[in-house]
Image: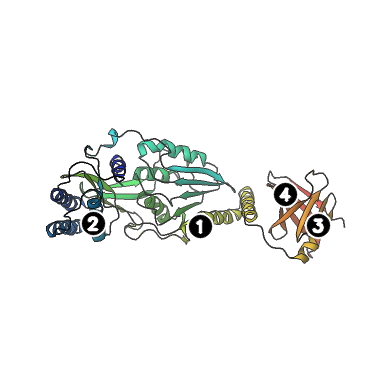
């Protein structure tokens, strides 16, 4: 979406809540001005001509008689989208006193989180960002930098675009920049603009510090059928460069930047798609088709799926510290799922005395006690072959140590801080 649309869209959306006040719009003037704007500015001239002719024919046939306000705006939007299959087309009622679309420099600075809904570190040292929009870079860039600073040191990154409807391509560019080597600029996308007949290239920005970039950190992007426009560009930029694994649903399919046009004859603003994306890898875009995920799952399952994939990937890392953090993350997931089943013969084989440690079979499960601990007996939860955690005790696991013949030799206690102790079997 064009950077000039934000103030207009906000005003228009507010107006949608009520019927526009004031005199009835001059429908003929409004529709003819819309047809002219579409004919002169729509990104594909031939399609724009057909759309404009359709609007004029509908006007002549009386299709827009006896409707006004929100109903007229909705009908014009529907007609344009059905003919062009371009979901960026919109007609909004606007307050009668609204002036022309303001230029970016005239817009007041927005307040709030600027599209960043959640930024956190998940178990297993996975950085997670949930974004609802790509706000104007003029205002959002400090927040982008702060978010990426908070994510420094993550072993993996998950960007959640499931509720993101788009925004400023310059903010998309800024976010992507942190995921590539700043010493090797990458051509991310190009945007063609029909009114000016120009094409602008978007590259990663070399001015960010090398220490802030995370070019080797594995990335997952979550999508839904709501993911649209700038959020799709972010997804497509990373997918085509094989920089991320996409998890979720096929996206909405909107690749056309828009400009707002205040229509004559009534209080309406039209969003006209004036450009298109041109990916440097594919030479194409995602308009009308959306982006197919690498891992297709319902949107509601995408985060859990991506976390599982990230932890499994990290657990196989050659870096033992990374692998250990991922192992703890996987253990946490298994505990949350209730653990893994273990049959009674296996439980009775493990039960016994291990010096100051004891394991017993009680009530169909394994229970653990240690003489030096004041907590008494705690239930053991199986989280893998010969691996257990204590119910209610995070950051500690027990591994059953066996000989080459499979006989149990002892218990190894492993603490999240890296400490390990050992108890030989004594019974």
Q: Where does the image place residue 67, in percent across and percent down from the top left?
A: 20, 52
- Which of the marked residues, 1 or 4, is nearer the chain's N terminus? 1
SS state under label 4: strand
Residue corresponding to mark 4: 414
Residue indicated by mark 1: 301
Q: Earlier in the sequence, mark 2 or mark 1?
A: 2
Structural crowding at the residue carrying mark 4, measured as other residues with C-alpha within 10 Å and reported as few (<14), some (14–19) or many (≥20): some
Which residue shows up at 41% across the image and 53% down it? 235
Residue under the point 80% across and 63% down: 349
Earlier in the chain: of badge 2 and badge 3, it is: 2
- Percent position of residue 148, x then y: 48, 41
Q: Nearer the viewer, mark 4 or mark 3?
A: 3
Residue 112: percent from left, percent from top: 42, 37
Q: CA distance from mark 2 to mark 4?
A: 64 Å
For the residues marked 2 and 1, what is the alpha-carbon distance in whole angstroms? Answer: 34 Å
| Snapshot quadrant of residue 342 | bottom right
Q: Which mark is residue 360?
A: 3
Asked whether, in this view, residue 160 is left or right of residue 92, the answer is: right
Compare residues 92 and 419 and report the one nearer the observer. 92
Q: Which residue is mark 2?
A: 80
Q: Is tag 1's residue or tag 3's residue first in the polypeptide sequence?
A: 1
Instruction: Please tell me whether mark 1 sits on a helix, a strand or a loop.
Output: helix
Q: Secondary structure at mark 3?
A: strand
Residue 403 visible at all: no
Q: Foreground residue, 115 or 310? A: 115
Left or right, 322 with respect to 13, comes to: right
In the image, which is nearer the foreground, mark 2 or mark 4?
2
Q: Are the residues flagged by discs 4 and 3 in contact, CB closer than 8 Å? A: no
**Where does the image place residue 27, in percent across and percent down from the top left?**
15, 50
Instruction: Using residue 188 as the reference point, say whether residue 375 is left or right of it.
Output: right
């Amino acid at each position: 979406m064009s950077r000039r649309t934000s103030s207009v869209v906000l005003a228009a959306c507010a107006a949608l809540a009520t019927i526009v006040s004031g005199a009835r719009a001059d429908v003929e003037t409004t529709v003819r001005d819309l047809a002219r704007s579409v004919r002169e500015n729509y990104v594909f001239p031939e399609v724009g001509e057909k759309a404009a002719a359709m609007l004029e024919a509908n006007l002549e046939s009386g299709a827009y008689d006896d409707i006004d306000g929100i109903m007229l705006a909705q009908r014009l939007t529907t007609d344009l989208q059905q003919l062009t299959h371009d979901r960026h087309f919109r007609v909004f009622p606007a307050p009668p006193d609204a002036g022309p679309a303001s230029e970016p420099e005239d817009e007041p600075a927005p307040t709030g989180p600027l599209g960043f809904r959640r930024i956190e570190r998940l178990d297993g040292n996975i950085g997670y960002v949930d974004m609802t929009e790509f706000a104007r870079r003029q205002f959002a860039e400090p927040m982008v930098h702060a978010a990426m600073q908070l994510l420094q040191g993550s072993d993996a990154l998950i960007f959640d675009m499931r509720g993101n409807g788009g925004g400023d391509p310059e903010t998309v560019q800024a976010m992507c920049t942190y995921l590539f080597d700043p010493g090797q600029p990458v051509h991310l996308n190009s945007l063609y603009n029909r009114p000016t007949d120009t094409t602008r290239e978007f590259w990663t920005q070399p001015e960010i510090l090398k220490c802030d970039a995370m070019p080797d950190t594995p990335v997952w992007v979550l999508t839904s059928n709501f993911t649209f426009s700038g959020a799709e560009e972010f997804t497509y930029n990373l997918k085509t460069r094989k920089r991320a694994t996409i998890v979720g649903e096929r996206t909405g399919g909107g690749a056309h930047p828009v400009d707002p046009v205040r229509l004559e004859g009534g209080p309406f603003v039209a969003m006209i798609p004036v450009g298109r994306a041109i990916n440097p890898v594919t030479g194409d875009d995602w308009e009308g088709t959306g982006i197919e995920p690498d891992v297709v799952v319902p949107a509601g399952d995408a985060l859990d799926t991506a976390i599982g994939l990230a932890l499994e990937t990290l657990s196989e890392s050659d870096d033992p510290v990374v692998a250990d953090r991922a192992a703890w993350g996987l253990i946490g997931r298994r505990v949350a799922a209730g653990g893994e089943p273990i049959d009674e013969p296996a439980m009775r084989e493990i039960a016994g005395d291990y010096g100051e440690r004891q394991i017993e079979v009680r009530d169909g499960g394994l229970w653990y006690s240690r003489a030096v601990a004041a907590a008494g007996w705690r239930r053991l939860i199986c989280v893998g072959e010969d691996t257990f955690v204590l119910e209610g005790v995070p950051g500690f696991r027990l591994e059953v140590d066996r000989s080459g013949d499979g006989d149990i030799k002892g218990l190894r206690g492993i603490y999240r801080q890296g400490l390990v102790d050992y108890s030989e079997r004594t019974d």
